[in-house]
Image: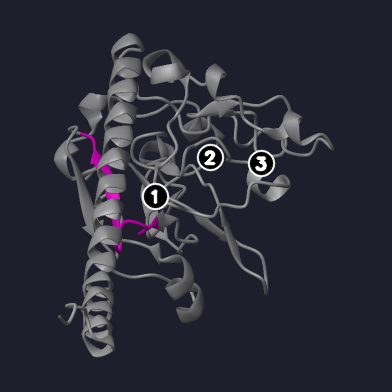
Amino acid sequence: MRKKAFTLIELLVVVAILALLVSILLPSLGQAKSLARSVVCRSNLRQLHIANTNYATENDDLYVAAAPDIFEGFGGRHRWHGVRQSDAVHPDPAMNSFDPLKGPLSSSLADGEVKQCTEIVKFVQDGADNAFEASCGGYGYNSVGVGSRCYRYGYCAKAMRTGMQGSEIFRPAETVMFTDTALVQGYPNRYIIEYSFCEPPRFVFSDGAGGIIEQGTPAPSIHFRHLGCANVIWCDGHADDQPFAFSTLEQEVLQQFRIGWFGPDSNELFDLK
C-alpha cells in the first residue's frame, strides 16, 4: 500500500500562503500597537490636564506657569514639569537635569512625575542639549496662552511668572493646553530632544503701546508621532488627535521627524481671542 504524503509542490504552496498571510497581518498588528500606545498617551495628557486644573483650584484660578524664571541665568531652574539645581551650565549633568518630584504638578500626578509617552521615540538623552527640558515626558505645554501672561504683556519676565486664569480663557474647547512635542537639534547631523513647550505658529510681543502683536515664526515643536497625528488635551478637558497641517522644517528633516503644526497658520488655537 502507498503511504499518503505531501508533495514538495504542495508544501511550497502552503509556505507561500503562510508568508502572504504574515505580510498582510504584520502591518495591521503594527498599526494596532501604535493605536494602543496612542490611547495610553492620551491618558497621560488627561492626567496632566487634571493636575493643572487642581493646581489652578488651589492657586486663585491661575494655571501653572510654564517657566517662571526662564529669564534668570541660563534659562532658569523651574519648569511646569520639574526643578533643577543648575541653569544647564554645570559640568555635572545631574545638576542640570530636572527633578520631576519637585515640580509644581507633582502632588497631582501618579508617582509624582509626568509619564513618558509610550510611542517609540528616540530622544537624545545625553548632554546639555537635552538637559534644559528633559523629564517632560515628550509633552509640551501651551506656554503662550495658558502657561504665561504673554497675551497681556508680550514675551517678557513679567509675563512668564504666572499662568493665565481659567476664567480668562474664553474658548477652552479650542485652546491647546498640552500636546506631543519634540525639538530638532544639531547640524548637519539632526536629532530630536524632549521639549516642554508646544510652540504656536507666531511669537507674541508687546507693541510698546499696551497692545500685542504676533510676528515671526518659532521653531516648530508639535510632534506628529502617532500614525501622522499629534495627541492634544484642550483646556476644557477633551482629548483628541490632530493631523499634520504645515511646517517650516526642511523637507528631508520633516520626513524624518514629523514636527510642525496642526490647524490654521496663526495663533488661533493658542491665544485668548
From the image, tell me which residue sits under label 3.
131
Tag of residue 119: 1
Q: Residue at x 36, y 41 (%)?
A: 151
Q: Disc 1 residue type?
A: Glu
Specify the quadrant of the image occupied by residue 65: top left
Foreground mark, 1 or 2, reads 1
Foreground mark, 3 or 2, reads 3
Label 3, label 2: how far apart the Cα atoms are: 23 Å
Near-viewer residue (176 or 138): 138
Per the rendered image, the range of residues in magenta is 223-235
Q: Are marks 1 and 2 in contact (CB under 8 Å)?
A: no
Q: Disc 3 residue type?
A: Ala
| Residue that protrudes farthest toward the right in the picture | 91
**Image location (x, y in percent) of residue 130:** 64, 47
Q: Is residue 86 visible?
A: yes
- Secondary structure at badge 2 equals loop
Circle 1 packing at 10 Å, graded few (<14), some (14-19), many (20+), is: some
Q: Disc 2 residue type?
A: Cys
Q: Residue at x 25, y 52 (%)?
A: 35
As drawn, 48 above or below 196: above
> Which label's residue is closer to the chain start, 1 or 2?
1
> Which label's residue is closer to the chain start, 3 or 1?
1
- Secondary structure at badge 1 equals loop
Specify the quadrant of the image occupied by residue 166: top left
Near-viewer residue (65 or 105): 105
Q: Magenta includes 226?
A: yes
Specify the quadrant of the image occupied by residue 133: top right
From the image, tell me which residue sits under label 2.
156
**Image location (x, y in percent) of residue 56:** 32, 18
